[in-house]
Amino acid sequence: MFLIGPFVMAGFLSFTNERLVPRPIPTRFVGFDNYARALGDPDFWQAFRNTFYFAMLVVPLQLSISLGSAMLLNAKVHARSFFRTVTLLPLVTPITVVIVIWAALFQIPDGMLNNLLRAFGYDGTYVNWLGDARWAMPSIVLLSAWATFPFQMLIYLAGLQEIPVERYEAARIDGANAWAQFRYITFTGLRNVHVFVLITTTIQAFKLFVQVDLLTRGGPLGSTNTLVRYMVQEGYSAQRIGYASAVAIIFFVLVAGFALLQRALIPND
């Protein structure tokens, strides 16, 4: 009802000129005009490139942080309870609160990040994190990786606890160092977890919206506009529901195709 129904309705509306407020323009069938218009719109392709660029940056960064944090929590280290609390903090903090906090860190010219750069010898005046097209998307990537990594971390932690301790003991007896144990036991033992986490994280990355909408509004110069935000703009701001539905169908096909490609290329047990 709440998933398949709206998808079928979007498929139907994508072939019409339906508007958010139908009057005074009557609804009529337009065939594939909406799809042709979307695929011929430079703003659509810019949003697609931005979304793909974000996913390519945030997925490896987020998975690295998640795996490292999971290994830290799984190890017998001092103050493990403290580390658990710290690493789970983003998971229980609303994303809007996280964005407000990071907006303060990104402030110019005297935000915390700019002050850190000066402390380490940066000779420029400041970095315009969200107002410079070169830095806006990497800034969103940094925020997003920190805000959502605990979910993947918990999955990795569960996977680590399934690896038998005897494997590590046997490896140490055979003279394997820490890197060899990680490469041949930990990383290999998490193969199925890698597949699941990679696909789910990629899908979540393609759905980027809230961070961009609240921090940059898609700017500067459209450098952070994403497919989801483009779709929302066309459907609600411009009130072109039929056209936005076509964008939604294209978006679904792209994400599903990319996920299936990942699943086919990455072997698992």
Image (cartoon, helix red, strand yellow):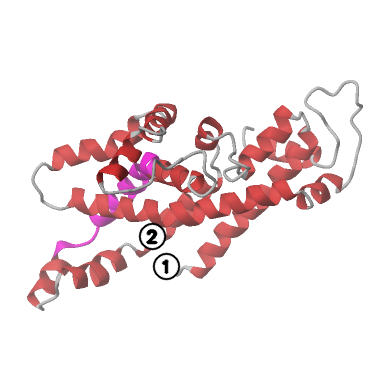
Q: Which region shows up in magenta?
A: 146-165
Q: Amino acid at mark 1?
A: Asn
Q: Residues within 10 Å of mark 1 (few under 14, many from 20)?
A: few
Q: Which mark is residue 268?
A: 1
Position of the N terminus, as image quadrant, is top right
| Contact check, label 2 and label 1, Cβ < 8 Å | yes
Q: Quick check: 216 above or below 184?
A: above
Q: Quick check: 244 above or below 191?
A: above
- Disc 2 to disc 1, how far (Cα)? 9 Å
Q: Residues within 10 Å of mark 2 (few under 14, many from 20)?
A: many
**Is 206 left, or right, of 95 in this rendering?**
right
Magenta span contains residue 164: yes
Where in the figure is residue 2, as x and y percent of width and height?
Answer: 62, 32
Position of the C terminus, as image quadrant, is bottom left
**Is 229 left, or right, of 43 in this rendering?**
left
Q: Main secondary structure of the magenta part?
A: helix
Q: Amino acid at mark 2?
A: His
Q: Quick check: 247 above or below 90?
A: below
Quickly name the residue at label 2. Answer: 194
Mark earlier in primary sequence (2, 1): 2
| Residue occupying the point 53% across, 37% down | 212
Where in the figure is residue 187, as x and y percent of width and height?
Answer: 29, 65
Give the residue at the far bottom of this rendering.
174
Q: Nearer the viewer, residue 210 or 173?
A: 210
Q: Is residue 4 visible to us here?
A: no
Q: Nearer the viewer, residue 206 or 261?
A: 206
Q: Secondary structure at mark 2?
A: helix
| Residue occupying the point 19% across, 62% down | 164
**Is 98 left, or right, of 160 in this rendering?**
right
Magenta span contains residue 27: no
Where in the figure is residue 70, as x and y percent of width and height?
Answer: 25, 51
